[in-house]
Amino acid sequence: MLTKADFIRHSLGLHLFFGRIMKEHALFLKVAFFPKNSELIRRAEELMRAFEEFLSRVVGIAGNNVSRTVLASGEVVTPFTLEAERATEYFTGTELDTAITERELDLSAADRILDPDRVEQEVKALNNSAITLISEIIEFKVAVLNALNECRAASNTYPLLVEHILREARLYLSLVQKLQDYKEIETNIIEEEIFWSRIMAEHSEFIRGLLDPTEDELIATANNFANQFEELMNLARTAQGSTAARSRVTRETVRATRRLREFKAAATEGLLNCEIKAVILPLLGDHVLREANHYLRLLGS
């Protein structure tokens, strides 16, 4: 059973990370559709704005009420986020509320939550709003995935990428529901490793497939990461019955995720500086970098 302070901090930390992730999922879906799919574009825009408004509410409550560890992890914002948003606005013509990012960059933590009873009620309301919004974006992602798989719509997004972001939304929903019952959400590191190593493997596959064919070295590096994280995911599955094996897999996963984080950071910077040929929006580079930072925090690194 979570204490009141832990309920507040875990909820706000989760929303600062995943609320932005969901907002960007809606953006990436929107800009990948063709003009014919105007209804899908409109719905993606609606969901993006809804998560943008939600994230603004979260930031308004988070000051001095969120964990220092979360703020320091790089999962909320990175040194590239603001510039990546501005570049993505320029490339797509979609306006983004960069003031939220500026406010997040100014967030700080405190040792004690002031007026915890009031903040607890505000966070409960946030969680209820999140459950509604996440359920809506899950429904949309399922509809998009079905339309792509049944050739009722076309997109510049891989069907696997839609499946990938659907899994993330379902995880987010399950975690918020646990928090509303004051349950711990970071209790099984092996399950987290299986989930997030798969995510890291797929990130590497997406990067590999979105790079220009002339980027031989980057393609080879991304391919190596994809193979490595697929192996780590499988090792995590087989290590569940052995404490020694679990510890060994976790150590290997930490080392690999650190290397992947550096690769993603360099790639994001390269995209922003127009040094890499790819069909990757700079904000997508920053997005997957934040997810690597989140994974490292879960791994205790």
Image (cartoon, rainbow, N blue to C red):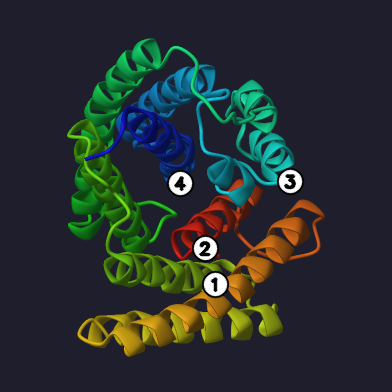
- Residue under label 3, please give it: 79
- Residue under label 4, please give it: 32
- Residue under label 1, please give it: 257
Kind of element beneath mark 2: helix
Viewer-nearest of discs 3 and 4: 3
Residue 76 in sight in this render: no
Q: Amino acid at mark 1?
A: Thr
- Residue under label 2, please give it: 296
Q: Amino acid at mark 2?
A: Leu
Q: Amino acid at mark 3?
A: Pro
Kind of element beneath mark 3: loop
* Residue 212 x %, y %: 64, 71
Mark 2 → mark 1, Cα distance in angstroms: 7 Å
Mark 4 → mark 1, Cα distance in angstroms: 28 Å
On-image quarter of the N terminus: top left
Viewer-nearest of discs 2 and 1: 2
Residue 111 in sight in this render: yes
